[in-house]
């Protein structure tokens, strides 16, 4: 079951900077271009974050920190999403909200 965490987008990510993944149209162009060639970066990651899927974002921590910040994705994004800035914000958010240990 997927738990949604509306506070992930606002105020948590919004407090860290100009998070704009909500503008994503889910077209997949960024993932087709990403040199890491995973289906997590960047399309799914933007969707997880925009929908407030905090646990999914945490599960993709390795992908978030493996991003090269090369900007190839956002230079071709038809929605003008600032993907690399969003990745930076997600890195900060992950560092400030580590996964809970049971
Ligand atoms: S290219 Fe832009 S609009 Fe398309 S999936 Fe990626 S972030 Fe979303
Ligand atoms: S900035 Fe990150 S997500 Fe975007 S294309 Fe480069 S490695 Fe992939």
Image: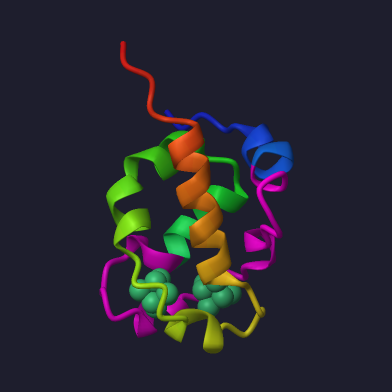
Residue 16's place in the image compared with 4, above or below, is below
The residue lying at 67 percent from left, 33 percent from top is 7
Say if residue 81 shows up in the picture.
yes
Question: Picture coordinates of residue 82 (x, y %)?
Answer: 61, 72
Task: Examine the image and state in which quarter residue 57 appears.
Answer: top left
Is 57 left or right of 67, judged from the image as shown? right
Is 65 left or right of 71, judged from the image as shown? left
Asked whether 29 or 63 is in front, the reply is: 63
Residue 39's place in the image compared with 7, above or below, is below
Residue 9's place in the image compared with 78, above or below, is above
- What's the magenta bit mostly, secondary-structure-wise? loop
Question: For residue 41: magenta?
Answer: yes
Say if residue 29 shows up in the picture.
no
Number of callouts: 0
Quadrant including the N terminus: top left
| Outermost residue toward the bottom in this view | 76
Question: Picture coordinates of residue 17 (x, y %)?
Answer: 69, 55
Q: How is the image coloured?
A: rainbow
Question: Picture coordinates of residue 20 (x, y %)?
Answer: 68, 62
Question: For residue 19: magenta?
Answer: yes
| Outermost residue toward the top in this view | 102
Specify the segment rendered in magenta. 13-42
Picture quarter with ligand 2:
bottom left
Question: Picture coordinates of residue 14 (x, y %)?
Answer: 71, 48
The residue lying at 38 percent from left, 27 percent from top is 99
The residue lying at 31 percent from left, 10 percent from top is 102
The residue lying at 71 percent from left, 60 percent from top is 18
């Amino acid at each position: 079951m997927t738990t949604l965490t509306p506070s992930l987008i606002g105020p948590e990510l919004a407090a860290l900077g100009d998070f704009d993944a909500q503008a994503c149209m889910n077209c997949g162009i960024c993932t087709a271009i990403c040199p890491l060639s995973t289906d997590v970066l960047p399309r799914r990651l933007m969707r997880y974050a925009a929908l407030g899927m905090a646990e999914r974002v945490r599960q993709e921590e390795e992908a978030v920190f493996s991003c090269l910040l090369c900007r190839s994705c956002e230079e071709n994004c038809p929605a003008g999403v600032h993907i690399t800035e969003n990745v930076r914000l997600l890195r900060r958010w992950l560092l400030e909200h580590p996964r809970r240990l049971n």
